[in-house]
Image (cartoon, grey):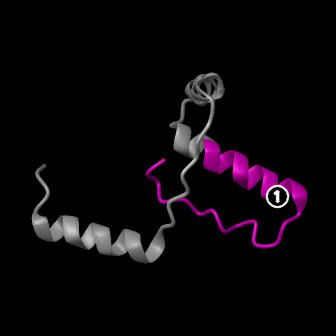
Amino acid sequence: MTRTRASNQAQYKYNAAHLKRVPLDMQLSDYEMLKAAADAAGVPVNAYIKQAIRERIERDGTPRGDMLTGSGRG
């Protein structure tokens, strides 16, 4: 399905209001391990990272452990 210009603008507006991009630089060898682990878990790398963050927040008892709700986009 082709997206219209209006649809793209609406998506951009939503993203600007509700999402925060977090760039992550890592060594290629670390990324390869991350990708392999995500593949083994059957999830995209993004979803794997978000889950790891959620688990760390819960483990450390950091307030607002539910802050990573995800969008289903992985």
Looking at this view, is 37 or 29 the one in front? 29
Q: Residue 19 at what x, y percent from top left?
A: 48, 68
Q: Taking 72 as reference, is 64 left or right?
A: right
**Relative height, residue 21 to residue 23 (above, below):** below
For mark 1, what is the residue?
58
Looking at this view, is 58 or 16 the one in front? 16
Residue ID at (50%, 60%) = 21
* Figure quadrant of residue 42: top right
**Relative height, residue 46 to residue 13 (above, below):** above
Q: Residue 3 at what x, y percent from top left?
A: 14, 57
Tell me where the magenta segment starts and ends, as one range.
49-74
Q: Residue 14 at what x, y percent from top left?
A: 35, 73
For disc 1, the neighbor class at 10 Å (few under 14, some 14 to 19, many from 20) is: some
Looking at the picture, which amino acid does disc 1 mark? Glu
Q: Taking 1 as reference, is 40 left or right?
A: right
For residue 70: magenta? yes
* Figure quadrant of residue 10: bottom left
